[in-house]
Image (cartoon, rainbow, N blue to C red):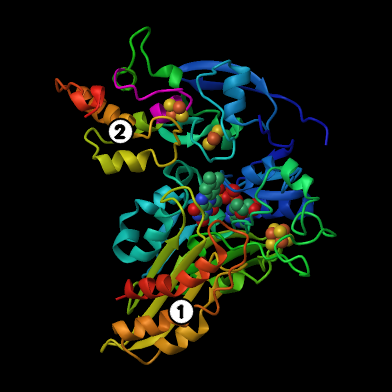
């Protein structure tokens, strides 16, 4: 049986205590929400925290509320199943609700949380393997600092892939992330939580607790998410397009955010695509042109499922379809 | 790190109390199988990728290989052992057996617990709803069709209908 390594289990009753314990133990400690990413990783010995801090008993992380100004605030511990069946989400955030439903399997969504999904570890075919498998290739840079990267052996960095389904659309929608640290709370834009590195993929401090995510109030924008994967269940995205377009009253696009998940170590902006869209109306011709412009930024590497060249080639088609869904 | 001390706790499994001592980093799957000898729940991938370890915690189907046992204390745990009433199989089990929906049977406990949770919520699930409810349970033998048919037949019988398996289900078309 694949077993978890031993650890001490903490169940703080509020966010302040959780952060305090995390700070006290430093690198030894990790938070756990649903455990559907952390526990498989611990069983494969990717992470072996001696202190595991469960967020299950922190009430403020379990709430969900429509704020007075119409924004939707979701606690980090809200499960993906709860979100999937929340009528307000389906009615006003159909693109995001779709992204949530595309995550893993119904059983895993019963356990996994939105906070855990936003912080999901990056993935790579040379990394998401058993300890023995990785030992046989003498590991790689993501688990051993002096080892090489098997995907790009000359590379000084890790190219593990951003694989969460909610991240591209959250960044495109400019949702806000609330973090609690030792010095209090701070709020940042989704994009600012991530950086282009397979190992240090988050900008937050290790002890910072993700408390809430706030979606913008419904308005003159529409967001969509489109996922490419081998099977219609279980599989992580090998490409995940999150798009959000803001429209003027006459249908002209005022602002466009397009993010590519599964194509790099963070949800990369398809900048050329965004530039092409702004100031125009979303015609079939524009959709095709803006889609085609996403070929270049789709920086696929040979470290996920499916053929690397084919993944790059279909990126324009997926981007075009995601844009069409914003109509 | 040295092995942490064991904790003593009482679990409610299939409506019965089980008092066991276990180390806090054990999964519910390990404690069910190794401390309570409830080996009906199977272990497969142990990484969330197969569904054979599915049990219900407070009625919700979850993967026992990724739930810590300490997190299930004080909750109502249902395993496959709790489905039959004495020697009387539950309709779902009966229909799975009648239709040959279990071949090697390794996925069956997980499929039963996921399907049982579905039928508690939804007495008349469509084929698509059944597929969705089982989208986290792999079966390498049956090709799923017999499983879907067995769940539909069980649902009909549980609604009190006098349903029989179709001839095609049993003899093929
Ligand atoms: C077979 C399988 C298939 C999967 N398929 C998909 C998929 O298709 N798409 C997808 O996006 N994901 C997938 N997942 C990954 C995972 O199930 C989800 O991403 C899930 O939402 C993770 O949430 P969690 O609560 O279980 O996270 P956890 O495992 O509890 O935590 C994940 C990480 O975030 C940290 N963390 C969690 N909450 C907080 C917080 N509030 N503050 C600070 N740090 C925190 C943890 O320390 C850990 O590093 C899959 C997993 C499995 C096992
Ligand atoms: S991209 Fe390279 S360093 Fe990063 S996980 Fe893969 S093989 Fe390891
Ligand atoms: S053993 Fe739990 S999902 Fe495979
Ligand atoms: S009957 Fe063999 S795996 Fe399903």
Q: Is residue B41 above or below residue A100?
A: above
Magenta residues, start to end:
B98-113
User: Label 2 to label 1, Cα distance in Å?
Assistant: 42 Å
Q: Is mark 2 within 8 Å of ligand 4?
A: no
Q: Is residue A5 left or right of residue B49?
A: right
**What chain does badge 1 belong to?**
A
Spot occupied by residue A262 in the image (x, y as percentages of width and height): 54, 64
Q: Is residue B106 magenta?
A: yes
Spot occupied by residue B20 in the image (x, y as percentages of width and height): 63, 18
Q: Is residue A16 left or right of residue B83?
A: right
Foreground mark, 2 or 1, reads 2
Q: Quadrant of ligand 4?
A: top left
- Residue at x 65% of width, y 71% of height: A195
Residue with the most extreme right position: A146
- Residue at x 65% of width, y 65% of height: A202
Q: Nearer the viewer, residue B61 or A161?
A: A161
Circle 1 is placed at which residue position? Answer: A257
Circle 2 is placed at which residue position? Answer: B148
Spot occupied by residue A22 in the image (x, y as percentages of width and height): 72, 52
């Amino acid at each position: 049986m694949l077993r978890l390594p031993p650890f001490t289990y903490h169940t703080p009753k509020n966010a302040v205590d959780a952060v305090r314990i995390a700070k006290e133990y430093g690198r030894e400690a990790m938070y756990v929400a649903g455990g559907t990413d952390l526990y498989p990783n611990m069983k494969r010995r990717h992470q072996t925290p001696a202190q595991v801090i469960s967020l299950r008993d922190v009430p403020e992380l379990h709430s969900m509320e429509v704020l007075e100004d119409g924004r939707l605030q979701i606690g980090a511990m809200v499960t993906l199943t709860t979100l999937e069946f929340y009528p307000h989400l389906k009615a006003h955030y159909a693109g995001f609700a779709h992204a949530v439903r595309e995550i893993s399997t119904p059983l895993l969504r019963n356990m996994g949380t939105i906070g855990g999904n936003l912080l999901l570890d990056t993935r790579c075919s040379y990394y998401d393997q058993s300890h023995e498998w990785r030992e046989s290739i003498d590991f790689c840079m993501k688990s051993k600092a002096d080892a090489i990267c098997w995907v790009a052996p000359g590379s000084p960095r890790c190219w593990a892939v951003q694989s969460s389904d909610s991240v591209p659309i959250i960044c495109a929608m400019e949702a806000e992330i609330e973090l609690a640290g030792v010095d209090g709370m701070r709020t940042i834009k989704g994009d600012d939580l991530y950086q282009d590195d397979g190992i240090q993929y988050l900008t937050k401090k290790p002890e910072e607790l993700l408390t809430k995510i706030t979606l913008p109030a419904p308005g003159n924008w529409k967001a969509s998410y489109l996922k490419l994967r081998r099977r219609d269940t279980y599989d992580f995205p090998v490409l995940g397009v999150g798009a959000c377009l803001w429209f003027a009253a006459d249908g002209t696009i005022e602002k466009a955010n397009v993010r590519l998940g599964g194509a790099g170590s963070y949800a990369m902006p398809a900048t050329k695509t965004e530039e092409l869209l702004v100031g125009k109306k979303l015609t079939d011709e524009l959709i095709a042109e803006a889609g085609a412009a996403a070929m270049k930024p789709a920086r696929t590497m040979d470290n996920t499922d499916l053929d690397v060249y084919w993944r790059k080639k279909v990126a324009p088609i997926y981007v075009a379809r995601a844009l069409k869904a914003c109509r | 790190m040295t092995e942490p001390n064991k904790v003593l706790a009482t679990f409610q499994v299939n409506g019965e109390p089980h008092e066991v001592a276990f180390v806090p980093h054990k999964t519910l799957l390990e404690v069910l199988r190794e401390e309570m000898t409830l080996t009906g729940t199977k272990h497969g991938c142990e990484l969330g990728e197969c569904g054979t370890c599915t049990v219900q915690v407070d009625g919700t189907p979850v993967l026992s290989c990724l739930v810590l046992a300490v997190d299930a204390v004080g909750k109502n745990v249902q395993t496959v052992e709790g489905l039959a009433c004495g020697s009387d199989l539950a309709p779902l089990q009966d229909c799975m057996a009648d239709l040959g929906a279990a071949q090697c049977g390794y996925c069956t406990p997980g499929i039963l617990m996921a399907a049982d949770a579905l039928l508690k919520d939804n007495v008349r699930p469509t084929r698509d709803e059944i597929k969705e409810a089982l989208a986290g349970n792999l079966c390498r033998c049956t090709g799923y069709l017999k499983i879907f048919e067995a769940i539909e037949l069980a649902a009909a019988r549980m609604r009190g209908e006098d349903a029989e398996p179709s001839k095609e289900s049993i003899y093929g078309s």
